[in-house]
Image (tube, helix red, strand yellow):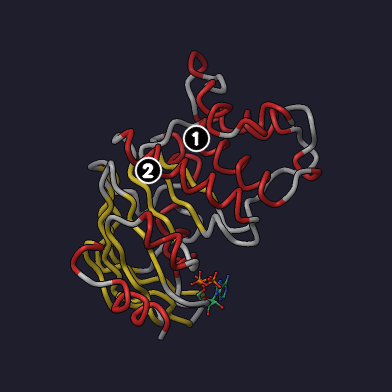
């Protein structure tokens, strides 16, 4: 589904990602772990076309997407839930969800009931402004908005950041449900180790822009993984 090979990324003269390679498959959660500033968000920005890579290749669903613009990537099935959520504060919940319509053909422009079933609070607050929602509700809205686009690949950047425990649990259950549906590859960037460990099928640990450990969760014990993530 997604194959990133030998990716480099720069901000100006600073090389932030170095020779990063990752794979993500449908029906699996692929976790990108690491401490602050190691380049996790930058990796998602490169995949989603928000910041272009300086070397390497990114292949999604058989297409080389390394130079595609974000709107085009969204229309071919790449959903991105950015760190900080990026909700439109003056639009209602419903209107925020409908912003996902722009990359769908006219006949498919509807909010599936499934999104309201996964996140009932979005139905309850359909006419409230995005900016009036709590952080946890905004996170649910941001994930719901990405799901409206019917993605084949879902990139989630720290969905637990600043969120209360009951909403974290609910987001975990939604990620499991989407994984078990089997038709979507999920790339989860997460610093909350227990949450990431519980959900991960495959994982990659980044340190100073390089992959230092990777594999299936079952190849390593939990303490080894925690050590690798914490340095
Ligand atoms: N737009 C930018 N211009 C210059 N440097 C940047 C920019 N964005 C990020 N950086 C730097 O790139 C490095 C990697 O940042 P990035 O946000 O990708 O890390 P991260 O692992 O996601 O961290 P966090 O968990 O804190 O979000 C950091 O040193 C950061 O300061």
Local secondary structure at mark 2: strand
User: What residue lies at 58% left-to-right and 27% top-to-bottom?
Assistant: 116
The residue most toward the bottom is: 231
Q: Is residue 170 left or right of residue 214?
A: right
- Name the spot of residue 51 as percent of width and height, x first: 49, 61
User: What residue lies at 76% left-to-right and 44% top-to-bottom?
Assistant: 133
Name the quadrant of the C terminus. bottom left
Taking depth in this image into account, of 97 and 133 the one nearest to the observer is 133
Name the residue that disc number 1 marks: 147
Taking depth in this image into account, of 34 and 56 the one nearest to the observer is 34
- Name the spot of residue 78 as percent of width and height, x first: 42, 42
State how far apart marks 1 and 2 are (Cα): 10 Å
Q: Is residue 97 left or right of residue 104?
A: right
- Name the spot of residue 86 as percent of width and height, x first: 65, 50
Q: Is residue 124 left or right of residue 187?
A: right
Q: Quadrant of residue 58?
A: bottom left
Name the residue that disc number 2 marks: 153
Question: Mark 1: is the Cβ under 8 angstroms from ligand 1?
Answer: no
Taking depth in this image into account, of 133 and 88 the one nearest to the observer is 133
Name the quadrant of the N terminus. top left
- Name the spot of residue 100 as percent of width and height, x first: 57, 32
Compared with 196, 109 (above or below) is above
Local secondary structure at mark 1: helix
User: What residue lies at 32% left-to-right and 77% top-to-bottom?
Assistant: 223
User: Which circle marks residue 231 in the picture?
Assistant: none
Are there few (<14), some (14-19), or many (20+) residues within 10 Å of tag 2? many
Are there few (<14), some (14-19), or many (20+) residues within 10 Å of tag 1? many
Taking depth in this image into account, of 36 and 116 the one nearest to the observer is 116
The residue most toward the left is: 219
């Amino acid at each position: 589904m997604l194959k990133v090979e030998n990716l480099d990324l720069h901000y100006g003269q600073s090389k932030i990602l170095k020779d990063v390679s990752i794979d993500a498959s449908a029906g699996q959660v692929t976790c990108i772990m690491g401490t602050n500033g190691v380049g996790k968000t930058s990796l998602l920005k490169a995949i989603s076309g928000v910041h272009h890579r300086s070397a390497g290749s990114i292949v999604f669903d058989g297409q080389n997407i390394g130079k595609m613009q974000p709107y085009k990537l969204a229309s071919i099935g790449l959903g991105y839930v950015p760190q900080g959520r990026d909700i439109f504060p003056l639009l209602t919940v419903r209107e925020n969800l409908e912003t996902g319509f722009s990359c769908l053909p006219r006949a498919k422009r509807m909010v599936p009931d499934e999104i309201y079933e996964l996140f009932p609070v979005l139905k309850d607050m359909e006419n409230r402004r995005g900016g009036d929602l709590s952080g946890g509700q905004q996170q649910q809205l941001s994930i719901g908005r990405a799901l409206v686009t019917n993605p084949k690949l879902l990139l989630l950047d720290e969905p637990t950041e600043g969120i209360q425990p009951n909403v974290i649990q609910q987001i975990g259950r939604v990620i499991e449900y989407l994984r078990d549906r089997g038709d979507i590859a999920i790339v989860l960037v997460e610093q909350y180790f227990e949450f990431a460990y519980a959900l991960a099928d495959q994982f990659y640990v980044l340190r100073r822009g390089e992959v230092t450990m990777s594999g299936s969760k079952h190849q390593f014990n939990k303490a080894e993984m925690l050590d690798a993530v914490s340095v």
